[in-house]
Amino acid sequence: MVPRAGSSYRRVAAAAGTVVLIASSLTMALAVRAAQTGAQRATVRWLLATMVLGVTFLGVKVIEYAEKFELHHVPGANFVYEGPHGRQVEIFFSLYFGLTGLHALHMIIGVGLLSVITWMASRGRFSTEWYTPVEISGLYWHFVDIVWIFLFPLLYLVDRAHHFA
């Protein structure tokens, strides 16, 4: 049986992380709107809030990864799983780390990108006529959020147990 989200996965923490990530989409949209209206300080504040929420999400992932390392649920030579279907479980964790790790990498890139955009906004580089970098950064951020909206149910909610019965 492949582990379900309710057993070895921290479904509640992952759901909370998802809420934080969705909230970061709201703050990013508010940053874009502030840039469109020429509200420089509001743009900076909303961008900072977006980055804080993004880093919070990544913090939840770090805690989750630490738990997997502690339980030896990291695929490879030291993988340990007490239960049937150990090979399938190891494959699942390979996919889990691959997908969530790639998503986390894109989150880190997004935070870096938003750091530059925030610096530019704090220097008054955007106006009501030109705020394209804020908007494009927002599109990137929303795309990364949407990817998580697909990963969350796939990795945490879908019940795979009946496939191995």
Image: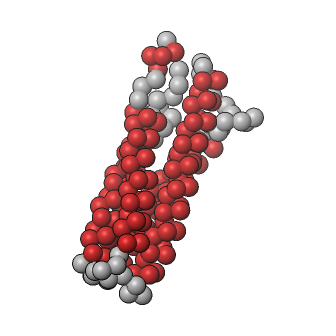
Which residue corresponds to the image point at 35% horizontal and 60% vertical from the top-left? 24
Task: Give how far across and how far down residue 147 sits, in percent.
Answer: 43, 46
Q: Nearer the viewer, residue 51 or 40?
A: 40
Task: Give how far across and how far down residue 32 sits, in percent.
Answer: 31, 70
Position of 61 with respect to 86 (left or right) is: left
Which residue corresponds to the image point at 40% horizontal and 41% vertical from the top-left? 150
Q: How many circles with numbers are drawn on the protein?
A: 0
Q: Is residue 123 above or below residue 68?
A: below
- Residue 89 visible, this orientation: yes
| Snapshot quadrant of residue 37 | bottom left
Task: Give how far across and how far down residue 3 sits, in percent.
Answer: 51, 28
| Snapshot quadrant of residue 97 | top right
- Residue 47 visible, this orientation: no
Task: Give how far across and how far down residue 105 sits, in percent.
Answer: 56, 55
Which residue corresponds to the image point at 60% horizontal and 24% vertical from the top-left? 88
Q: Nearer the viewer, residue 47 or 36?
A: 36
Q: Is residue 71 above or below residue 119?
A: above
